[in-house]
Amino acid sequence: MAVASNVLVGMAEIHVLKGSGGFSCLGLGSCIGLCMMDPTAQVAGMAHVMLPEAFADRAGEKPGKFADTAVPELLALLEKAGARPERLVCAIAGGAQVFKFGAEGTNRLEIGRRNAEAVLTHLKSRGYTPRGQEVGGSLGRTMTLVIETGIITVRTVTQGEKTLCNLRA
Amino acid sequence: MQPTRLTPKLSPTLTIEDIVSRTADLPTLPAAALAVMRESESATGSAQSVGKYLAQDGALAARVLRLANSSYYGLSRSVLDVSEAVVVLGMRNVRNLAMVASTYPWMNKPLKGYALAPNEMWRHSFGVAVAASLTAEKSRKVSADEAFVAGLLHDLGKTAISVWLENKLPAMLRIAEKEGLPFDAVERKVLGYDHMEVGAHMAESWNLPQTLVDVMRYHHRPSELTPTNAMVDCVHIGDYLAGSMGFGLGGDGLGYQFDENALSRVGLGVDDLDSLADAFMVSYDQHERLFEETK
């Protein structure tokens, strides 16, 4: 019997699977793990986003690296694999950052917060609201999606693993 | 004589000297590596003298040669002895290889007190070495090669303090959350000192250069060093970058403050951080190849 694969999604990578298996983003610091899934088509994907926006002078970089290019690229790959945009559900985790910077909360130093906001903005502009999200704080996270169950878990070294949401529910 | 291994428990009377003298398996740097470091910084240091010191430690010399012959450097022919490695790669490159070869054996061990799994302390230290080096290169304030070594060693104190914090981490994190404190402040509150101070104490006992001692002591609070030091600033920024990218985050995670003044002191702005983070990932991937074949 074939063992369903669990794909490790490295920084700036996007992976899409159809049928069975799953994904993990290990050691998310300020990066964002973005999962999207069409439960009917059994198609799911994950992106490991490093930074909010692509550098103007560097077209052609890995699209998974930046929120503004990762979201459309993940959607395109999912559609290509048979997903229908209107059936897609999503979840995000990550976006941790160093201890408080100051009161204003708009500092460009806050890569984690900016990453989370950028991913949410690009999802929202396409009509998507995450079914589950766990962002912020100072802890590193590992995010995992199992396609068969649709369950997304988030693990931290001190708080253990917990279910974030079910993309099939 | 081996130091007595006590049952680790937090005690208000446990001094830094106690931590250092009573911790079993305390890391050490080989005498040859320390000699190479001093020689490479010395005005009279030469390829011959560095090679001579390195050759005194056969095991270390062999590890350095494996690194020198890795595909990372892409040499057209094999380097057969350390003197030749110094000539081909340069004194500072070989010094850095000696430091990498010396620290990897103990940095890849788990640090339970910080909830760092095997290899995670190494990933963090090596990541900060790469990021501090890039920051130094961009700032042009200090040598990128020296920033690499400073980044590699910056969290030395954690290796000594970790065993004493085992089983205490959850309580310390609760204090951090309840009182809104960065993790190093919780260490000071609970122990009376932090991993920076312990690292500085170890660095002093090894007779490391004062700049490295300062890096260990001030890397989370660089503005408290008088006068400030660009090397400490570069490691502070490198620590922020490597941590933000998720490299070797333990239970303390990103629970430290970032001092924006460190950026301005080395001539950088907040807008440089995204491009530095990007460059860091590219550079780390390249550096990692150095080790894949030599572990």
Image: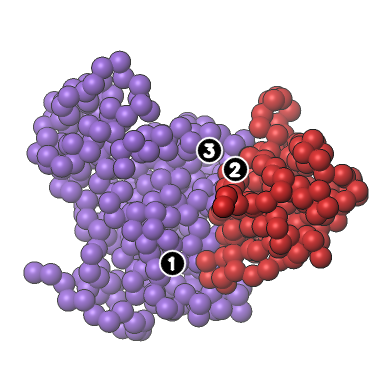
Chain for disc number 3? B
Q: Residue, x 30% and y 38% (percent of image)? A: B294
Left or right relative to A25: residue B109: left
Q: Residues within 10 Å of mark 2 (few under 14, many from 20)?
A: many
Nearer to us: label 2 or label 3:
2
The x, y position of residue A87, in whole percent, is 88, 51
The x, y position of residue B60, in whole percent, is 18, 41
Which chain comes out red in the rendered image? Answer: A
The x, y position of residue A145, in whole percent, is 67, 57
Q: Distance between the residues labelled 1 and 3?
A: 24 Å
Q: Distance between the residues labelled 2 and 3?
A: 12 Å
Q: Are marks 1 and 3 on the same chain?
A: yes
Q: How far apart are marks 1 and 2 (CA)?
A: 24 Å
Q: Are marks 2 and 3 on the same chain?
A: no
Q: Residue, x 33% and y 62% (percent of image)? A: B159
Nearer to us: label 1 or label 2:
2
Q: What residue type is labelled 1?
A: Tyr
Label 2: element kind: loop
Chain for disc number 2? A
Q: Residue, x 57% and y 72% (percent of image)? A: A159
Q: Which amino acid does label 2 sit on?
A: Met
Q: Residue, x 65% and y 63% (percent of image)? A: A153
Q: Are marks 1 and 2 in contact (CB under 8 Å)?
A: no
Q: Do labels 1 and 2 share a chain?
A: no
Q: Tell which of A1 and B248 is nearer to you.
A: A1
Residue at image mark 2: A11
- What quarter of the picture does the C terminus of chain A occupy? bottom right
Label 3: element kind: helix
- In the rendered image of this protein, does residue B97 appear above or below residue B30? above
Residue at image mark 1: B114
Circle number at residue B280 = 3
